[in-house]
Amino acid sequence: MSSTMPIQKQTKRKYDSSRRKAQALETHQQILVSAENLFTSKGYAGTSIESIAQKASVAPETIYATFKNKQTILSKLIKTSILGDDDNPVPLMLREQIREVAEERNQKRQIQLFAKRIQVLMSRIAQLLEVMKSASKTEPEIKRLLKKYVDGRFQGMGFFIDCVTANGALRVNKLTATETVWLLTSAEVYNLLTIERGWSGEEYEMWLSQTLEDFLLQ
């Protein structure tokens, strides 16, 4: 009898621990979703920790304990929007969706795959980037984060151009190609077309693919 008691207690502790972890994860996600909704509808300055807490049905102290401030929440949202998850340790450039473009040997197919990836990414992050740009005017840490993202995106476009060039010469030099792709795939252009002009994600993807083909390929 006595030999079974520790096992029973251990099982209970494991169950309690798992349940607490699941509850914490759910609360964490509720806060992020609520913050994103408020950031994109009311702006960074118009969103307070208290309003996020109210929308997420948690106490403000819970948000302070988990994230400390709005900057951290926005940074977390940007990171998860870019990567699509928060726990995967694989760097972005080594992930399957990037390798698929890099390993493709047909230039038109490379561009089509790239346009598809950009559309998916922009659908998650374009509005948040507008929030980040606004917040960067008053928040030095957000300004640094925005610069890091912009610089990283430019490098990413250069990598894409290298991948396409590996399969054949382009109509323009690398710098011009990189700068043009960087411009066309910006959140500003995506928001203009999908929000101001009402394009669907599929229409944006088709436009981006055809425009890049016409500009890059001989």
Image (cartoon, rainbow, N blue to C red):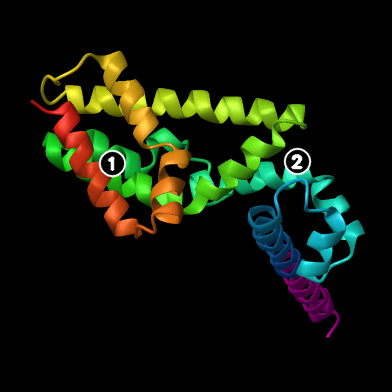
Residue linked to disc 1 = 114
Q: Is residue 26 left or right of residue 65?
A: left
Q: Which residues are magenta?
A: 1-21
Across and down, in percent, residue 2 comes to 86, 80
Q: Main secondary structure of the magenta part?
A: helix
Q: Amino acid at mark 1?
A: Phe
Q: Is residue 218 left or right of residue 75?
A: left
Task: Say which label, 1 or 2, has the lower sequence index.
Answer: 2
Residue 120 visible in this rendered orientation of the protein: yes
Q: Quadrant of residue 55?
A: bottom right
Is residue 15 located in the magenta-colored stretch of the structure? yes
Vertical placement of residue 139 versus 24, above or below: above
At 53% from the left edge and 52% from the top edge, which residue is drawn? 85
User: Is residue 17 or residue 28 the one in the foreground?
Assistant: 28
Residue at far left of view: 218
Q: Quadrant of the C terminus?
A: top left
Q: Is residue 203 left or right of residue 75?
A: left
Q: Amino acid at mark 2?
A: Gln
Q: How many marks?
A: 2
Q: Quadrant of residue 5?
A: bottom right
Residue linked to disc 2 = 71
Question: Mark 1 and mark 2: span between their CA atoms?
Answer: 30 Å
Residue at far right of view: 61
Q: Residues within 10 Å of mark 2 (few under 14, many from 20)?
A: some
Q: Element type at marker 2?
A: helix
User: Is residue 4 or residue 108 the one in the foreground?
Assistant: 108
Residue at far bottom of view: 1
Is residue 122 located in the magenta-colored stretch of the structure? no
Across and down, in percent, residue 104 comes to 17, 38
Q: Quadrant of residue 57?
A: bottom right
At 30% from the left edge and 38% from the top edge, which residue is drawn? 99
